[in-house]
Image (cartoon, grey):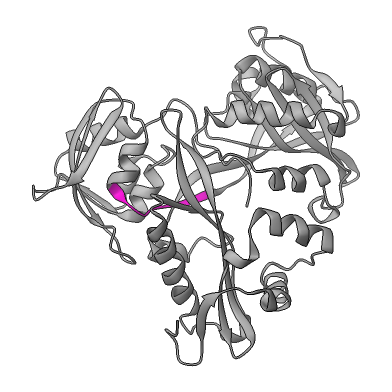
Amino acid sequence: MTLIPGITIRSATEADAAGVRLLTETSFGTRSDEAWLERSARLFDPLDSVVAVEGNRVVGHVRSREMILTVPGERTVPACGIAGVGVAPTHRRRGILRAMYTEQHRRTEAQGLPLTIFTASEGGIYGRFGYGPAVRQNAVTIDRRFAEFLPTTPDPGGVELVMLADVTDRVCEIYDRWRRLTPGAQVRPEASWGNLFADPERFRGGGSDLFTLLHPDGYALYRYYREDREMVVDVVEMRTVTTDAHAALWRTLCGLDLVARVKAELSDNDPLPYLLGNPRLVRTTGRYDGLWLRLMDVPAALTARGYRTDLDVVLAVTDPFRAAGGTFALTVRNGHAECAPTERDADIELGIDVLGSMYLGAYPARAFAAANRLQAKDSGKLRALEEAFGTDRDAVLGWFF
């Protein structure tokens, strides 16, 4: 397919492997050893990639795979997961990204997948393609030396100090229970587990290899490193199915001797600050998006998730990139939705990117209304929309891709 003079958009072939490797290493500033390339090929089939080529030179790349995403209501939806997006710095501002995305989205539509998701390196690019940030993450640091738990904080125990290699099956089982409850989490393929358990040097940032805390209903993977001559623990991944597991693991992390600070990522409503006598000790150092989402088929996507309250609303959805927009009647009863095109007047007008941000429940409708990115005929419809799209459990990205 030729959308730009001199540039061909097509599926990758085995002959493109070296060019794709050079482009992705340049785009993300990392070198890849053969073991990493082999694991990555099992996670994303190289021949499923879309490439932009000029002659025999690869100047653009997008890879994808089908994923199973948990959505509100403890339901799952098939989605296209996109990764490895890059354009050569020698070929910027020529429309190559748009051309690759046009082809990638055409393929996703042909597969009938209702959602596309990805983790974005930059935040200013993807709104024009109909994506919105759908998961929020907060980087925090806790001064462990002063962390005291309230008398009301549960102390259930049950945490074991273990070697990760000895408990990989238990970690996988706990993750799978957790992801079934958590919007934004995906089924984790064996290749992704392989990347995590291999713990390659490129992910350590100068820290130790992974240490593991295990509870029957949760786990924490963390590493040690030194910062300003102090010992710091970085929690790489914590997954808890129950509040007891959450409290028990945090009690253990805050009991690590010789450690000055613990760093972690928390969702907006994580209970950690409320377990401590001084909640200020959980200090937010960064706030960013963990997942971006686009609705490929509005009725299919909206009927796939559950809702917290009943709803009757007509949505006018604008799609700047594809043809998924339109006016849709959305009716929810007892958590189950029906959605279909309609000629009725709209109660709510919004972009498909805004709908994507609201989809997992992390971003409230009223914030977009205040920013004039969502227009409502009356405040009652706006409140009803926000309440229905709300969730009882924060959206969290399951595994980074």
Residue 386 point in image, percent of width and height: 30, 35
Magenta span dominant secondary structure: strand
Residue at 31% x, 26% y is 335
Q: Quadrant of residue 71?
A: top left
Question: Is 400 left, or right, of 297 in this rendering?
Answer: right
Residue 249 point in image, percent of width and height: 73, 22
Residue at 64% x, 86% y is 57
Question: Is 354 left, or right, of 223 in this rendering?
Answer: left
Please state, as top left, top right, bottom left or bottom right, where the N terminus lies in the image: bottom left
How many numbered badges does the structure rendering display? 0
Q: Quadrant of residue 89?
A: bottom right
Residue 143 visible at all: no
Q: Check residue 300 for magenta coloring.
A: no
Would you place residue 206 above or below residue 231 in this image? below
Residue 398 point in image, percent of width and height: 60, 40
Residue 202 visible at all: yes
Q: Nearer the viewer, residue 224 or 100?
A: 100
Would you place residue 198 above or below residue 105 in this image? above
Q: Residue furthest left?
A: 344
Residue 360 point in image, percent of width and height: 43, 39
Task: State the extent of the magenta-drawn residues as a range.
Answer: 291-298
Residue at 80% x, 26% y is 213
